[in-house]
Image: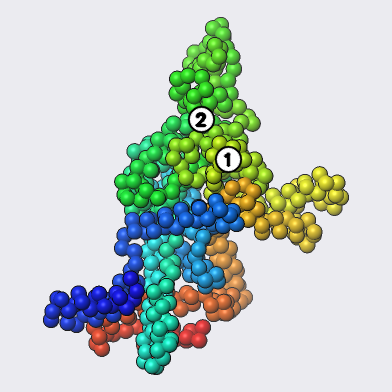
Amino acid sequence: MTYQARIKELNETIAANGAPWGAIDAESAARMVVQNRFRTGLDIAKYTAKIMREDMEAYDRDPANYTQSLGTWHGFIAQQKMISIKKHFGSTKRRYLYLSGWMVAALRSDFGPLPDQSMHEKTSVPSLIEELYTFLKQADSRELGDMFRELDTARENGDEVEAQRLQKAIDDHETHVVPIIADIDAGFGNAEATYLLAKKMIEAGACALQIENQVSDEKQCGHQDGKVTVPHEEFHQKIRAIRYAFLELGIPEGIIVARTDSLGAGLTKSIAYSQEPGDLGDKYNSFLDCAEVDSAEITNGQVFISRDGKLLAPKRLPSNLYQFRAGTGEDRCVLDCITALEAGADLLWIETEKPHVEQIAGMVDRVREVIPNAKLVYNNSPSFNWTLNFRQQVYDAWAEAGKDVSAFDRDKLMSVDYDGTELAAEADEKIRTFQADAAKRAGIFHHLITLPTYHTAALSTDNLAKEYFGEQAMLGYVKNVQREEIRQGIACVKHQNMAGSDIGDDHKEYFAGEAALKAGGKDNTMNQFAAA
């Protein structure tokens, strides 16, 4: 519905209610309606799921249409990302947000900073989703509020052309609300617990949930040791539980991202149930590190499985976990991916130990032999030393091609001494094109960085503290923060406006008319930034 149509509709509603509603202004009410496009989290989930589905289809047509996101841990950070994206690129198209369980654990738990082991309150995840969307909706209200004030000014100046332009801009306004891929860890319990948490996350607005195949009560960060996977059927129960949650809440378009940690996980807690040779349980068990035994070798407390008429003893550790054979990680990843898609997942996530296009592509090629349109979400993780990894990749490629690498020490390629070299420049170019290259070659539909703002907050705070508490004192803030905000057009330099002061003034005027006591008068120091 257009802005003018909304005003007309509300005029009719107000008139129908007679004198008691006589002080209600239809255009003011219409503005509030337009500024509140999404009434519930389910409205958001349905809207953003449609966007993701369309983007997935666009990627299938052309892998240049890959998507990206940055992880976030606070609504303000999410809001500033989207405002910046609209400022620099004009559109949020194919740009999402990622909600990292790692950052929730490290930054949002009542227990204080925690490792990524599913020890934080699971309710903190849907609470953060709701917070992110509250801030994104406020960004819409703020931007539209500015447009409404410009429209009033154009009318006051009798500039009908500008007024028409602004009305069209209001009708065509692109929301800051974008898809969030939200981390549900390993489900925080059994399949029922996964279903209950999934519902809360969807109701808060999440259209895409990412779940991993680790044991819920042994969950580890994907880039740490000690990861323990579960048999496929247990994982598939949780995939189905999430699908049921989406269906119950009327979001059949909802997206499930199935993550496999098998590449770096050498342990399992369970021997899979198997009814016959070659079934899924048997395939899972075939990766176990087993030794053939006879009755004379049986000792107390051993566990056995049978295969091809032989009695085998899986290697059982003091932790009561079972060990997989070394070198089986890629095969297990491929099996995990194929079976997860067959069980109803929409996208895959393969957690790797380094960012290497051909390593990822080697696994995806095998998956696509069975499921041709398989697509990945990939973690461009800060846990990787990107500089060292790519310099080593270039070094190895040069050495294989017979190029002289005697000027370089492969183990010390991170050194600043190499920063100006041809090798470093080539590595940086490979980093720059990594996402596009991996989208084309390795089936990666969505690239994300899990923890970027965790690191940017630490870096910028360190720089400010060094300057402000040092010899630069106040100049350290003014020169490196405020002046740069002004020069670069950072919206929150007008922090009162960003926090909603002007929106509040608009409402005061709607509610009280000329009696409104507004904050944005001539004595508001934010007026010093009018030229900014």
Residue position marked by numbered label 1 in the rendering: 368
Residue 436, position in %: x, y? 63, 56
Report which residue position mark 2 lands on: 268
- Image coordinates of residue 277 in percent, x first then y, are 51, 19
* Nearer the observer, 394 or 44: 44
Question: Label 1 near label 2: C-beta < 8 Å?
Answer: no
In this picture, residue 226 sits left or right of residue 516:
right
Q: Label 1 amino acid?
A: Arg
Residue 239 appears left or right of 456:
left
- Distance between the alpha carbons at the discs numbered 2 and 1: 26 Å
Identify which residue, 27 or 189, lies in the foreground.
27
Dot 2 or dot 1: first in sequence order is: 2
The correct choice, above or below, for 241 with respect to 474 in the image is above
Quadrant that contains the N terminus = bottom left
- What residue lies at 33% left-to-right and 68% top-to-bottom? 36
Q: Is residue 526 visible?
A: yes
* Left or right of residue 224: residue 144: left
Rendered location of residue 444, percent (x, y): 58, 49
Residue at 51% x, 60% y: name it: 94
Secondary structure found at label 1? helix
Q: Residue at x 37, y 56 (%)?
A: 46
> Taking the image as drawn, is residue 474 in sight?
no
Give the class, few, some or many, for how many residues have Cα within 10 Å of label 1's Cα (few <14, many ≥20): some
